[in-house]
Image (cartoon, helix red, strand yellow):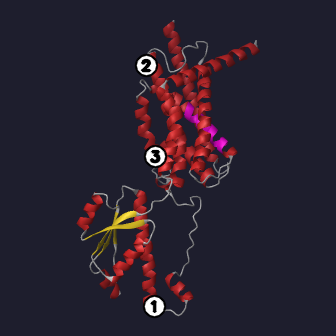
Amino acid sequence: MLLSRMVTALQTLCNIWAQELRAALKDQGVVMFFFLLPLAYPLLYSWIYNNEVVYEVPVVVVDGSHSHESRAFIRAFNASPNVQVATYSNSIDEARQRMGRQEGYGILYFPRNYAERLHRGEQAHVSVYCDMSLMLAYKAVFQTAQSVATKLNSSILLHRQPTFNAHEDELATEPLAVAEVPIFNATGGYGNAILPGVLILIMQQALLLGIGMAAGTARERNRQGYPTLVNTPEANALTLIIGKALFYFMVFSVMATYLTLVVPHLFHFTALASASSLIALLMPYLLAVIFAAMALSFAVRQREQVMLLVVFTSVPLLFLTGISWPESNMPWIWESVSYLFPSTFAVRGFLRISSMGATLSDIQPELMGLWLQAVVYFGLAWLMYALQRRRILNARK
């Protein structure tokens, strides 16, 4: 008797899995979010930032000094591989117009008394104006100008305070030696810093979009039904959840492997995570996202609604993970809201094990948070399915 029930339950699970597969393959929107988006979007996004840093950023120079000192600064500035003196202007207003025409992403301005103040031993000023709409260009222009100013300051200091040997020169210009050794993000680029977290967030958004769109389609076709397989009447709420979740988990286990192993290898991102660490992190993450999406799908009445909801929350969720804005500077209310989303724990944990070489014990809080979310969202999804199934049975009676 028990064996017969087990066989029946297994057959029901297989039927649900097969019907969910057929329903997904027949829906172009679900195919796009389940397969095309996880495969193509990370490649496009990673390819855009594959260079990590920008080179030859055009800069407009306004040289009001026309002196040997200003020309020396400009030559050193232009010698950097990160920037390029694109053109000269006679005034700040003219330089702003050139920036408006995108002839440059920054302005280097020398006042008329630049050389005079240097010769009188006074503090001279060089103004740098940057276009903040492109953060990488701003970083290149500002840091190059700062590096050139630091180097020229050292030479001016040595000229005013003559020394006798190279050791005294070094002590005069750099009394405290600083050795900059980048760790974790060795390239110092945008790709290694942000894209690993974006790859994890893509999985969550793709699952939410696909499951929500499938639920919206089911509701549009059967107004009295609910987003499950009505062709399997012997299935209870628990069997439906497990069967559908099994299909989603199998599909996105492959996608997760592609996103966390293949894409970082193709674009040479820092990848220090072991296979066991990735499995331990991604398993509760996928389960939490799947159950959360199944519970959220009951709020979807039309297939287009889920696109508005998920696309609108993509950027806020990226900020809530803490990779583009420090967690320590985040207001407590938003920090509390971030704990509702599986991407928060998964992104933080993935960055630590992949980019920083952390172990599973180091990401224990993130793992506990993901498993807790998986349990809570599973219970919520089961409750929603059970209540809706009871409504359907009562309606049929």
Q: Does the magenta stretch include residue 282?
A: yes
Residue in view at x 48 percent, y 20 percent = 218
Tag 2 secondary structure: helix
Tag 3 secondary structure: helix
In the picture provided, is 141 more to the left or to the right than 109? Answer: right
In the picture provided, is 67 more to the left or to the right than 252? Answer: left
Q: Label 1: which residue?
A: 161
Q: Which comes before the other along the chain, label 3 or label 1?
A: 1
Question: Does 41 appear above or below 268?
Answer: above
Q: Label 2: which residue?
A: 220
Q: Label 3: which residue?
A: 334
Labels 2 and 1 touching (C-beta < 8 A):
no
Residue in view at x 44 percent, y 31 percent = 306
Q: Which mark is residue 90?
A: none
Q: Residue 241: which quarter of the image?
A: top right
Q: Distance between the residues labelled 2 and 3?
A: 35 Å
Q: Which residue lies furthest to the front in this view?
A: 86
Q: How far apart are marks 2 and 1 (CA)?
A: 82 Å
- Which SS type dominates the magenta stretch? helix
> How far from the left and from the top, in percent, is residue 295?
52, 28
Q: Which comes before the other along the chain, label 2 or label 3?
A: 2
Along the line of sight, which residue is nearer the eye, 80 or 193? 80
Labels 3 and 1 touching (C-beta < 8 A):
no
Q: How far apart are marks 3 and 1 (CA)?
A: 53 Å
> How far from the left and from the top, in percent, is residue 283?
63, 38
Residue type, label 3: Trp
In the picture provided, is 386 more to the left or to the right than 123? Answer: right
> How far from the left and from the top, in percent, is residue 249?
61, 32
Residue in view at x 65 percent, y 20 percent = 14
Where are the magenta residues, as a range?
A: 278-290
Along the line of sight, which residue is nearer the eye, 298 or 275? 275
